[in-house]
């Protein structure tokens, strides 16, 4: 069978505070919406803005980090995969679908006063990864020369 790829990369802002819950066995789950914006010229030459909302879900330690440090307005870099689930609506009997991004990695891009948690002054450049049993959480000071985000840091 040929190899396939299911990978999503987003950079956007949270529309509201994340919702963090715990499964009956104690696993953390965070759900939130991320907005990405596109600016384009229409046929008349006028600039138009389009906002796309993405449903994100994070699990385990990544969900806990989201709950602690991410707030409405936070700018995030998210890596994950698309996952679609379906269910039957109990009232109408219709089949419903929901597509969401299951986050595997995130980087907090907001600085102090830009929305989001401030890590006691350490939000710029902090990242978290949810891969297997080992989770990394890197914190670098927000106001040092090497921690500033440059064009070279953007993955595309």
Image (cartoon, grey):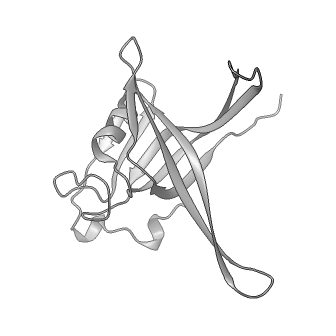
Taking 128 as reference, is 131 left or right? right
Q: Is residue 93 above or below residue 111?
A: above
- Whether residue 23 is visible: yes
Identify the residue shown where x is 58% and y is 52%: 53
Quarter of the rendering containing residue 112: bottom left
Q: Is residue 52 above or below residue 8?
A: below
Taking 83 as reference, is 135 left or right? left
As rendered, which of 113 and 89 lies closer to the eye?
Answer: 89
Residue 20 image position (x, y, % from top left):
38, 32
Residue 118 image position (x, y, % from top left):
23, 55
Identity of the residue furthest to the front in this view: 91
Identity of the residue furthest to the top in this view: 25
Taking 106 as reference, is 5 left or right? right
Quarter of the rendering occupied by the N terminus: top right
As rendered, which of 81 and 40 lies closer to the eye?
Answer: 40
Q: Is residue 86 above or below residue 146?
A: above
């Amino acid at each position: 069978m040929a190899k396939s790829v299911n990978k999503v990369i987003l950079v956007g802002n949270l529309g509201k505070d994340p919702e963090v819950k715990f499964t009956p066995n104690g696993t953390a789950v965070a759900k939130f919406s991320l907005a990405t914006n596109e600016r384009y010229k229409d046929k008349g030459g006028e600039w138009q803005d389009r906002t796309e909302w993405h449903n994100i879900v994070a699990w385990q330690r990544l969900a806990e980090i989201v709950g602690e440090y991410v707030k409405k307005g936070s700018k995030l870099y998210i890596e994950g995969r698309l996952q679609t689930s379906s269910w039957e609506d109990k009232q109408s009997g219709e089949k419903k679908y929901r597509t969401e991004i299951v986050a595997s990695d995130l980087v907090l891009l907001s600085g102090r006063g830009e929305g989001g948690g401030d890590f006691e002054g350490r939000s710029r450049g902090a990242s978290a990864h949810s891969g297997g049993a080992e989770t990394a959480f890197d914190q670098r000071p927000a106001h040092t020369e090497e921690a500033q985000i440059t064009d070279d840091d953007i993955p595309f």
